[in-house]
Image (cartoon, rainbow, N blue to C red):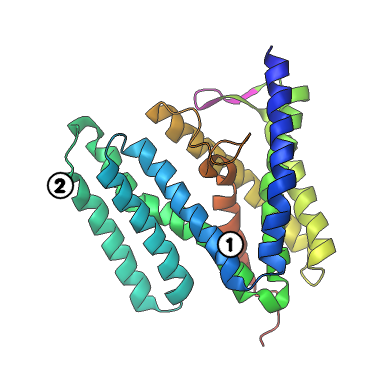
Amino acid sequence: MGDSAANKNLLVRILTSVVVVPLLLAAMFIAPTWVWYCVVGLACAIGGQELFGMTHPGDKVAQAIGILATAAVSVTLYFWGNDARVLVTLIVVIVLQGALVPLWRLGEIPTAGLRIMAGMGGPLYVGGLLTTIALIQRDYHGHGGPGIVVIILAIAWLGDTGGYFAGRFLGKTKLYPAVSPKKTREGFFGSLCGSVIGGVLFQLLLVPELPTWQIAIVALFAGALGQMGDLVESLLKRSTGIKDSGWVVPGHGGILDRLDAVLVVSPLMYLYLIWAQPFPSP
């Protein structure tokens, strides 16, 4: 029964990808840059809803504030991210509202610490980190920005795929059973292989002007930290008693379930681009 359920879930995942991936590629490569940001902004809002649904269960008002704060972080970073005054103001406002909302929406005292820290960090975690994938597509559009986005998704998602199959067929040694009982060390190394292969393959196909060895290193570190991001979300779900963060992606769970690694890989790629400066100045 377990294998049958796993096979059915795998089929649903594949069918979902067949429908969703072409739409994402069209938004990245064909449509104006604002279309891709709309996709990313929607993902930020849904991710915020999933996160605050876990940390603020039953409090629709606090959840709505969290969603709005997440969207505000995304919009501010995308449109005014080059203004240091705006960024500092954003951080101050987000931290203060995260601290003050639980005083208004008191709820249960034992969960107040979680709600305070989620209100402070959640909008930055989801809205800030995820928006980097829209910044890359826009700011590097003349240097293969959409292709770099594909590299990011390949590092994250082929890493997940490599980890899934390596863990399923070779997995014997548990990686971190207290947080994620199903993950194995073999799956972890399979994920690293998938991330590096996916990153290098799509770099060669889509953005050949990027140094392959640099992308291989980025993919290796981003793939490893992406798996840590997966464990972070697993820890959050286990601590709040949630199995899946949501249901919006058939066969994959919620947005956070699908993008937990992207939330780590994308900002790391963005840091690589702005610090290593692999492209000539215009």
Magenta span contains residue 233 = no
Q: Rounded to the nearest whole Å, what is the CA distance between mark 1 and mark 2?
A: 34 Å
Residue farthest along the top direction in this orientation? 1
Q: How crowded is mark 2: few (under 14 residues within 10 Å), some or many (20 or more)?
A: few
Does residue 250 appear in the picture of this structure?
yes
In front: 256, or 216?
256
Q: Up-down: is 117 above or below 185?
A: below
- The residue identified by callout 2 is 104
* Disc on res. 22: none
In the visual, does 249 lie left or right of 126? right
In front: 132, or 214?
132
In the visual, does 124 lie left or right of 97? right
Q: Up-down: is 236 above or below 65?
A: above
Q: Quadrant of the C terminus?
A: bottom right
The residue segment tinted magenta is 174-180
Query: In the rendering, at what x and y percent does residue 76 appear?
Result: 41, 69
Q: Which residue is drawn at 58% across and 62% down?
A: 133
**Residues tagged 1 and 2 counted as in contact (Cβ below 8 A):** no
In the visual, does 210 lie left or right of 252? right
- The residue identified by callout 1 is 133
Residue kind at label 1, given as amino acid type? Ile
Magenta span contains residue 176 = yes
Does residue 164 appear in the picture of this structure?
no
Element class at badge 1: helix
Element class at badge 2: helix
The mark tally for this picture is 2
